[in-house]
């Protein structure tokens, strides 16, 4: 059962990374990345049980916290004035090239 | 007692895998950012919770149980907070949800007798 759970979580991580690559907006990508991080925490926990080494749970705990901090950090950066200006500059240069 | 724990753990893991797979299909096939967020919310709370409870039933003693409960607690705190911040940021940056256009064409009007 643990092996089946590992395979299922790997498939879900593959689907999330597909959405992260093809996502039309920035927020789709952040959402898929958040889901990928959560599934990574579950994968590390299950692998710890599968390999008989429960010390992996510490790594999963740290990964959950780092994932949260990184998502909040990217969201704060996407609200900042510099990001919006750089985004507008990129779109204006693209329109100018066209 | 041991067999009962094994069966319960297997059932919880199976339910968690089913919920995670349905959320993974949903994030690919839903048409809009906000509907995709609904699919991710299902996997992040109930799917992860079920898988972690299944892992708890595998080895219900000592420090491992405490660490798994801490991971479950952090997951249940972190993911709704991140989803809330993500939806607020998307709305603040003018990402509008896709609405159904067919309801604006007067389809809901009462038909004349």
Image: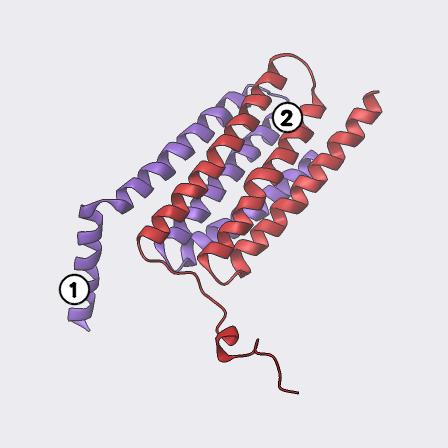
Q: Nearer the viewer, mark 2 or mark 1?
A: 1
Q: How is the image coloured?
A: by chain
Residue A47 at x, y = what percent? 59, 30
The quadrant of the rendering that contains the C terminus of chain B is bottom right
The residue that label 1 is drawn on is: A93
Q: Nearer the viewer, residue B112 or B5?
A: B112
Q: What is chain A's hue in the picture? A: purple
Work out whether B52 lies above or below B25.
Answer: above
- Circle 2: is it few (<14), some (14-19), or many (20+) Cα within 10 Å? some
Q: Quadrant of residue B48?
A: top right
Q: What is chain B's hue in the picture? A: red
Work out whether B21 lies above or below B105.
Answer: above
- Circle 1: is it few (<14), some (14-19), or many (20+) Cα within 10 Å? few
The residue that label 2 is drawn on is: A49
- Do marks 2 and 1 share a subunit? yes
Q: Is residue A83 left or right of residue B56?
A: left
What residue is drawn where x is 62% and y is 30%? Answer: B52
Residue A85 at x, y = what percent? 17, 53
């Amino acid at each position: 059962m643990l092996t089946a759970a590992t395979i299922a979580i790997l498939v879900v991580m593959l689907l999330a990374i597909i959405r992260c690559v093809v996502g039309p907006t920035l927020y789709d990508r952040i959402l898929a990345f958040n889901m990928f991080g959560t599934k990574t925490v579950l994968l590390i926990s299950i692998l710890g049980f599968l390999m008989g080494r429960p010390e992996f749970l510490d790594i999963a705990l740290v990964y959950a916290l780092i994932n949260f901090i990184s998502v909040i950090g990217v969201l704060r950066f996407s609200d900042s004035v510099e990001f919006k200006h750089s985004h507008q500059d990129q779109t204006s240069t693209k329109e100018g090239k066209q | 007692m041991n067999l009962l724990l094994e069966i319960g753990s297997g059932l919880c893991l199976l339910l968690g895998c089913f919920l995670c797979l349905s959320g993974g299909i949903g994030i690919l096939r839903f048409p809009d950012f906000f509907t995709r967020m609904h699919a991710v919310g299902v996997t992040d709370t109930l799917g992860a919770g079920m898988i972690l409870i299944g892992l708890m039933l595998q080895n219900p003693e000592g420090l491992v149980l405490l660490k798994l409960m801490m991971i479950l607690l952090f997951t249940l705190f972190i993911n709704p907070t991140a989803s809330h911040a993500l939806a607020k940021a998307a709305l603040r940056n003018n990402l509008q949800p896709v609405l159904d256009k067919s309801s604006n064409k007067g389809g809901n009007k009462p038909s004349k007798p």
